Image: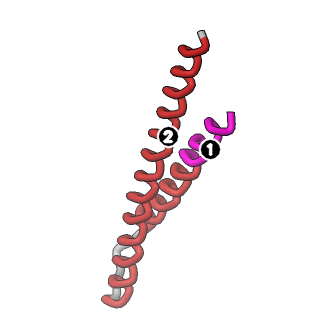
């Protein structure tokens, strides 16, 4: 059962990371100073990279879960 818990935990962590990054994007406001604009732009870039990374992590863990399910089905078919 350990093989099932690890991808599920990874999916949950990826979802949390995505949610945190998305909230940073939502909280971004229009800057009033040019220096603040540059800082916000970098922050938004970091948040978008975090969102993409979380999305990739989610997909990888989901695929791992699917492979685990397929392996269990194959094992049950062999034993049956």
The disc, 1 or 2, on the residue closer to the chain's N-terminal end is 1
Query: Residue at 50% across / 54% down in the picture?
Result: 19
Question: Per the image, is 33 magenta?
Answer: no
Query: Residue at 54% across / 45% down in the picture?
Result: 11
Res. 5 image quadrant:
top right
Q: Position of residue 70 (x, y in %)?
A: 49, 26
Query: Residue at 57% across / 48% down in the picture?
Result: 10
Q: Which residues are magenta?
A: 1-12
> Quick one: SS at disc 2?
helix
Q: Position of residue 59 (x, y in %)?
A: 43, 45
Res. 32 image quadrant:
bottom left
Q: Position of residue 13 (x, y in %)?
A: 58, 52
Question: Viewed as shown, does residue 33 lie left or right of 57?
Answer: left
Q: Are marks 1 and 2 in contact (CB under 8 Å)?
A: yes
> Quick one: SS at disc 1?
helix
Q: Quadrant of the N terminus?
A: top right
Front residue (pair 51, 29): 51
Residue corresponding to mark 2: 64
Residue corresponding to mark 1: 6
Residue 72 vs 30, above or below: the answer is above
Residue 53 vs 38, above or below: the answer is above
Question: Per the image, is 8 magenta?
Answer: yes
């Amino acid at each position: 059962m350990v093989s099932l818990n690890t991808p599920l935990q990874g999916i949950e962590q990826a979802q949390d990371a995505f949610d945190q990054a998305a909230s940073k994007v939502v909280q971004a406001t229009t800057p009033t100073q040019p220096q603040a604009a540059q800082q916000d732009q970098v922050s938004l870039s970091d948040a978008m990279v975090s969102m993409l990374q979380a999305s990739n992590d989610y997909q990888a863990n989901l695929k791992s879960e699917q492979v685990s399910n397929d392996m269990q089905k194959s094992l049950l078919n062999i034993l049956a």
